Amino acid sequence: MSTAVSLSPSESMDTIIRPLGPVFARQADALLDLRECAVARSRPGRCVACYFRLFEASRAAEVIARLCPLRAWLETQIEVVARDEAETLLETLPLRLEAGDLETFCRAMMDEMREDRAHPGSHLVLEFRFKQAA
């Protein structure tokens, strides 16, 4: 019989970020901001922005591959929500970090909402949020 060991949020994030330190030494601020927001489960948009800062700084395929655990963690912890002008939740979308930069990602999300959805009203807000605990 095995006993599962549950890591605290800071231990879990440290396990993901620690190997990135030497590779992304010049992006230490992004790593620290990401860790702080992830552990506190605050400012999910900042986490996504930091991920894209790291992604843009990594030009070699082997460096990009090192971001895979971070990307997987972000995609399981953060989602995109759509709200109307009355702040009513209209839709929850999975976070898929497939774009090469934050602007392209955001424009693709906006285009998807414009082209593939028919939500009532003229004002739509998209935002990141941490998923609710099960």
Image: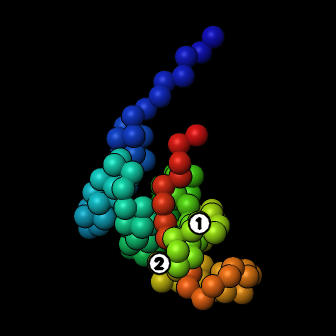
For image coordinates 30% across by 53% down, the residue present is 36
**Which secondary structure lies at badge 2?**
helix
Residue 102 is marked as 2
Q: Amino acid at mark 2?
A: Leu
Between the residue at mark 2 and the residue at mark 1, the CA separation in whole angstroms equals 23 Å
Q: Residues within 10 Å of mark 1 (few under 14, many from 20)?
A: few
- What is the x, y in percent for residue 104? 53, 83
Q: Indicate the quadrant containing the N terminus: top left, top right, bottom left or bottom right.
A: top right
Q: Nearer the viewer, residue 71 or 37?
A: 37
Please state which of the two labelled residues, at mark 2 or mark 1, is closer to the viewer.
1
Where is mark 1, residue-wise? 89
Q: Nearer the viewer, residue 47 or 131?
A: 131
Residue 24 found in image quarter: bottom left
For image coordinates 53% across by 42% down, the residue present is 133
Q: Nearer the viewer, residue 19 or 118?
A: 118
In the picture provided, is 60 more to the left or to the right than 94?
left
